Image (cartoon, rainbow, N blue to C red):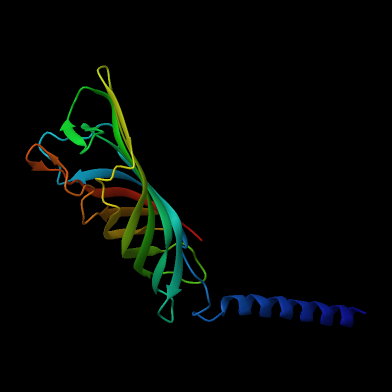
Amino acid sequence: MRYLFFVFCFLNFSFLFSQEEDEYSLPVDSLFREDQFYVSVSYNLLRNSPTSYSQYSFSSGITLGFLRDMPISKNRNWAIATGLGYSYSDIKHNLKVIPSSPNEYSIDNSYDRSKLRLHYVELPIEIRWRNVTYKSHKFWRVYTGFKLSYLFSSSSIFESNANDYKLKNNNDLNKLQYGPYLSLGYNTVNLYAYYGLNSHFKDSKIGDERLQLNSFNVGFIFYIL
């Protein structure tokens, strides 16, 4: 009986040991994927602004979506990714829009509340480098890409003691936005930056000065799975 007990323990130990060995001897090119859901929070700085234009408080930018991770190297450190997302910008500034035909634009600091809200559907594509392994989800990453954004809803709001104005889906806004972006960091802490190559407005003017406004977002991005 003692002999059988010894054999049983030996076989059981060998089985557990072989399981552990197999677990840690998986091939490097196991079919793992990384960072397929993302959320970013950023501050939206507007570039190419007209004279006397200013922002106040915190002009926020939020993005979220899904990216299909497609490794292109055997160790899966290099990958490309493409996907679908949503972005929201809440720009607080001193730009007043008076709905008319055509719309009238001016700089007015008498506001109680003045903002531009933008909602986009996004199509990002990026090249990814990370020093990930199948054993750990904590790694350095550098992702750079380009995204195309389609504006599907907007609203301009100006409220003051004298007048209140609100304009939905302003036709003077460019429907398409596009530009490069970069994210880099370690584990859950990642810096994020995006620069819009085209302006938010088409051909609108304040006096003789063209109204453009290009987005420059700086903040943090978080990846899940």
Location of residue 74 (image quadrant)? bottom left
Evaluate whether residue 40 shows in this view.
no
The outermost residue toward the right is: 1
Query: 96 or 191: nearer the eye?
Result: 96
Q: Most extreme residue toward the top, as rendered?
A: 161
Q: In this view, does 73 lie to the left or right of 52?
A: right
Q: In which quarter of the image is residue 79?
A: bottom left
Image coordinates of residue 138 in percent, x first then y, are: 45, 61
Residue situated furthest left in the rendering: 208
Across the whole image, how many numbered discs are drawn on residues? 0
Percent coordinates x, y for residue 141 in the rendering: 36, 64
Of the pair 56 and 79, the residue shown nearer to us? 56
Residue at 34%, 55% in the rendered image: 150
Q: Is residue 43 toward the left or the right of residue 109 in the image? A: right
* Relative to 94, residue 73 above or below: below
Q: In this view, does 172 lie above or below 186?
A: above
Q: Which of 208 and 13 is in front in this view?
A: 208
* Residue at point 17%, 43% (across, down): 204
The answer to whether any part of residue 180 appears in the image is yes
Q: Residue furthest front?
A: 101
Query: Which quarter of the image is occupied by the N terminus?
Result: bottom right
Q: Residue 82 in the image: x percent, y percent?
A: 40, 67
Q: Residue at x 24, y 17 (%)?
A: 162
Residue 107: image location, x then y, percent = 16, 31
Q: Based on the displayed image, in which of its 4 quarters is residue 124 positioned?
A: bottom left
